[in-house]
Image (cartoon, rainbow, N blue to C red):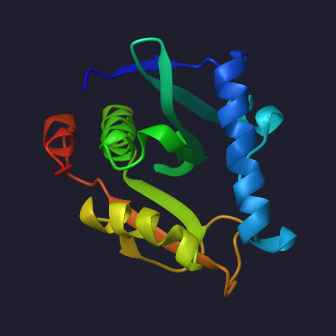
Amino acid sequence: MMLRFELGGLARPEVRRLLEEHLADMHATSPPESVHALDLDELRNPAVTFWSVWEGGELRGCGALKDLGGGDVELKSMRTARDARGRGVGAAMLRHLLRAAAERGHRRVLLETGSQEFFAPARRLYARHGFAFCKPFADYVDDPNSVYMELRLDGEDASKVEACPP
């Protein structure tokens, strides 16, 4: 599987459809007050850097980093296309985002994901890559529908982050 990561791409119809699917799933699995997925306008914020991942001409997934300041960055909009699930696309995107965070000098990568069974594969992916549970960060509050995780990059270099297992 040869994957190509592209910076940006929010105007591409395939990307917009994948993000719409992502938002629809978030609203179908979580109460409205517990949905923290970013919409297109929020993904255009200068603090957010968005990538899409392609295999040939097919969109396989996406992900973003939101700069929180103080050396922290939040993982956002992680999504693998349905027909690409179970093929390592999510792990490849996560490794790409971790490399980008390390190269930009961030000290911690933080994330919020759901506590429901629907999100169990995502939680396992993050745990396999070294994320640990943490308390709510930034503007998040304790929420039974949310799980918060962090990965410390202090002292890590991009080549070590790149070596995360798939």
Look at the picture and state if 68 lies above or below 113.
Answer: above
> Which residue ends up furthest to the front in the rendered image?
83
Q: 117 or 112, which lies in front?
A: 117
User: Which residue is outermost to the right?
Assistant: 32
Q: Nearer the viewer, residue 35 or 13?
A: 13
* Residue 141 pos. (x, y %): 71, 79
The single residue placed furthest to the top in the displayed view is 57
Q: Residue, x 52% and y 50% (percent of image)?
A: 75
- Residue 80 image offset from top left, x and y in percent: 49, 43
Which is nearer the eye, 141 or 70?
A: 141
- At x 46%, y 49%, the residue is 71
The image quadrant of residue 31 is bottom right
Q: Determine whether, in the image, residue 17 is placed left or right of residue 101.
A: right
In the rendered structure, the answer to whether residue 148 lies left or right of residue 32 reads left
Q: Is residue 21 visible?
A: yes
The structure residue drawn at horizontal position 67% and vertical position 81%, both measured from the top left corner, is 145
Name the spot of residue 33 as percent of width and height, x first: 84, 72
Give left or right: position of 162 versus 92: left
Please state the horizontal and vertical placement of residue 137, each as a whole percent of the image: 60, 69
Residue at point 51%, 19% (across, down): 7
Q: Residue 108 sits in which quadrant? A: bottom left
